[in-house]
Amino acid sequence: MMRSLHRLVPAQRTEHTTNGDPGRAAEEGMAFLIVVVVISLVMAVLAATLFRVALDNVSTSSRMVQQNQALQAAEAGIDLAYRKIQSATSLAAMPCTTGTHAIAGTLGGAPARSTFTVTLTYYSTLTPLTSLSCTGASPTNSSLKGATAVRLTSLGRDVAQTAKVQSEANISTPDKTGVFHESVFVNGSLSLQGGGSFVGGNNNVYLNGTLTCRGSSSVDGSVVVFGNVKTSGGCSIAGEVEATKTITLSGSAVVGGTLTSTCAPATCSVGISVSGTKVSVSGSMYAKSAIHIGSSSWKTRYLAPHTVTVGGTQVQVQYTINSNMTSLATPTRETFPPLNWSATGWKTDGYTVETASTCAALKAMLSTIGSATSSVAIYTACAVTIPTISLAHSLAIFSTASISIKQSDTISSKTGHHTLFLVVPTTSDKTCGSNVTVTIGGQILTTVTTFVYAPCHVKIAGTGTIKSGKIYSGQQLTVDGSINMGSATFTPPGAGAVRASPVIGLIYERELS
């Protein structure tokens, strides 16, 4: 037993000597060192890459911040220009591109202050494009007299980034703007049906209610609505649409300007809603609450860059969808202006004043109005039905009951251009019964500028046409027929004080670059 144990001990020593071979230990140490070096190199490369990515992210983020600040500066220039135009009390105070009324400014910010400069061009007509001079220290009355539109181009800068925004608006200048400055003012709802067509002229269509536009109806101007906007069929609105509630576009509706809904999320879950694939919008969308686009293909097509002609040059513009913009300001709500009978005012304006105390006397007056030797203003408590008349002079009719033109009758002018006032005064029946209306079913020809006013309802039906004029309805305006509504700049006697500031009707606002 002792001998066997003695032989095992040397064997264990021999195995221990083999495992501690110096050459093999050196090889293992070298391999370990190589692994450490490789890992260190990989870590160094990764660190360098991550550092480069971090630098790129910082640079990209910085450029994005600068670009956004440049865009905000450009838009601030547009807003300031419109405020200066609307606050001008004379043509000489209107802002210009150069001189003391030039528009430029600086906004605070980091890492640098943003700046903007605005170029302004005024136009007497848009078709054809006829510009007016406005480049001196300040414009004179003669240089901007007759201005009906303005185009603003604002360039914003922030460090190395720039942004260009352009906007165009119809404008009524102070020398021709009165209390009745809108083409259409409805202190309630407006319903455009069938083939009805409105041409808004140089001013807004203004509603204190819902706008419903269907069929092939059109508004050739901008629309401000204190309520909902609902479009369907081939409804067409040439300018901007601004609403205090939800704007809904469907069918093949067309909007030529920007969409803005200032309805807060607490009131409207959706500010703007677009359904279908045939809707056309030529401006960006802004809403305090959500914007719902029913078709992803329409949204993709809408957000793609568009080529438009600006000042005779084709440029690419980018439209955007801007939801949940809590800073959007609600437009100023206007009060429906009163209009009552003023015999003295009409006499001062050169009218022969007549009071029809009986309905028989009224009928006799209307039968001879075509041969009148001067303009005539008639006041009556009777319901008025105007027959076919060829006017030799202007005519004003005030009725506390109702006024109508039958579909078979026509109002025209013998020579020259005359004005027709059809007024149900404010002091009429406040309950707005069915008889307190103005209803036009016949034709009023191009040579007769027409002013329609009623504290209750106005109805345009049949094939009636108003080529130039204004409509003021205190409760509801319904159009079901063929009508072209133009712009006119007159103010009836007794209408109150003349507004001192211009009125802006925004057509579009686009980011050009």
Image: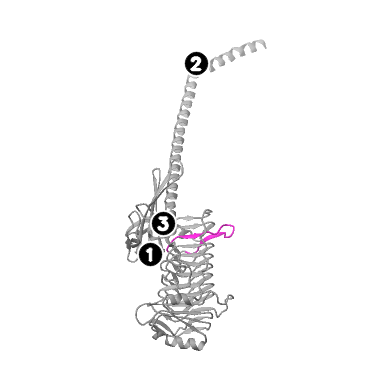
Element at label 2: helix
* Residue 115 position in % (x across, y down): 41, 47
Task: Name the residue at 34% across, 57% down.
Answer: 134
CA separation in Å, label 3 and label 1: 20 Å
What label sits on residue 340 in the rendered view? none
Crowdedness near tag 2: few (<14), some (14–19) or many (≥20) residues, C-alpha within 10 Å: few
Q: Of the residues shown, which amino acid type is indicated by label 2?
A: Pro
Q: Quick check: is 11 in the magenta stretch?
A: no
Nearest to viewer (mark 2 / mark 1): 1
Q: Of the residues shown, which amino acid type is indicated by label 3?
A: Arg
Q: Tag count in the figure?
A: 3
Name the N-terminal-most of marks 2 and 3: 2
Q: Which residue is mark 2?
A: 22
Q: Main secondary structure of the magenta part?
A: loop
Q: Which residue is mark 3?
A: 510
* Residue 137 position in % (x across, y down): 34, 53
Q: Which residue is mark 1?
A: 148
The N terminus: image quadrant: top right
The residue segment tinted magenta is 256-276
131 with respect to 212 (left or right): left
Name the N-terminal-most of marks 3 and 1: 1
Element at label 3: strand
CA separation in Å, label 2 and label 3: 81 Å
Q: Quick check: is 274 in the magenta stretch?
A: yes
Q: Of the residues shown, which amino acid type is indicated by label 1?
A: Thr
Q: Residue 140's quadrant in the figure? A: bottom left
